[in-house]
Amino acid sequence: MPKNIKLIYVTSSSEDEALNIGRTLIDERLVACVNIIPAIRSIYRWEGAIEDEKEAVLVMKTVGAKVGAVTKKIKSIHSYDCPCVVVMDIINGNDDFLQWIVNETA
């Protein structure tokens, strides 16, 4: 089984912004796949106020070696001052799919 495969969770202000981020990361081979959930509702505290906003979510698959570059790129093109970028380890799965992630980010 391929090792050090990551799942990255990111929120964005809109589906259009999510599409821009996703396409950019795919074009630059920083991630192998991006799933976009176009409409979620987020409630959070920001700068002392409770916010209630519509957002979109990106779920991306990549290799550990690309996480720093993915985070840097997202921060450079994202509309938020402090974008949510959360990385999770994929500890198991379809070996063929995990190898595909490795191949597509090479």
Image: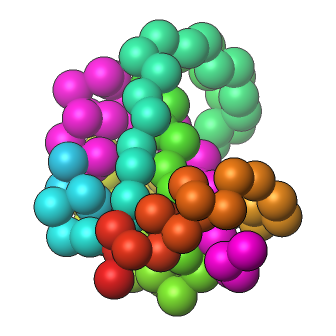
The residue lying at 32 percent from left, 35 percent from top is: 18
Q: Which residue is found at the position 56% from the left and 55% from the top?
A: 97
Q: Is residue 49 above or below residue 20?
A: above
The span shown in magenta is 1-22
Q: Nearer the viewer, residue 33 or 75?
A: 33
Q: Quadrant of residue 98?
A: bottom right
In this view, the residue farthest toward the bottom is 65
Q: Nearer the viewer, residue 53 or 35?
A: 35
Q: Find residue 87 and report its image quarter.
A: bottom right
Number of numbered discs overlaid on the protein picture: 0
Image point (39%, 74%), residue name:
103
- Across and down, in percent, residue 52 comes to 61, 13
Residue 86 located left or right of residue 56 = right
- Give the percent coordinates (x, y) of residue 69: 39, 81
Check if residue 20 falls in the magenta segment.
yes
**17 or 64, which lies in front?**
64
Q: Quadrant of the C terminus?
A: bottom left
Q: Relative to residue 8, is residue 22 depicted above or below?
A: above
Is 77 part of what is drawn in magenta?
Answer: no
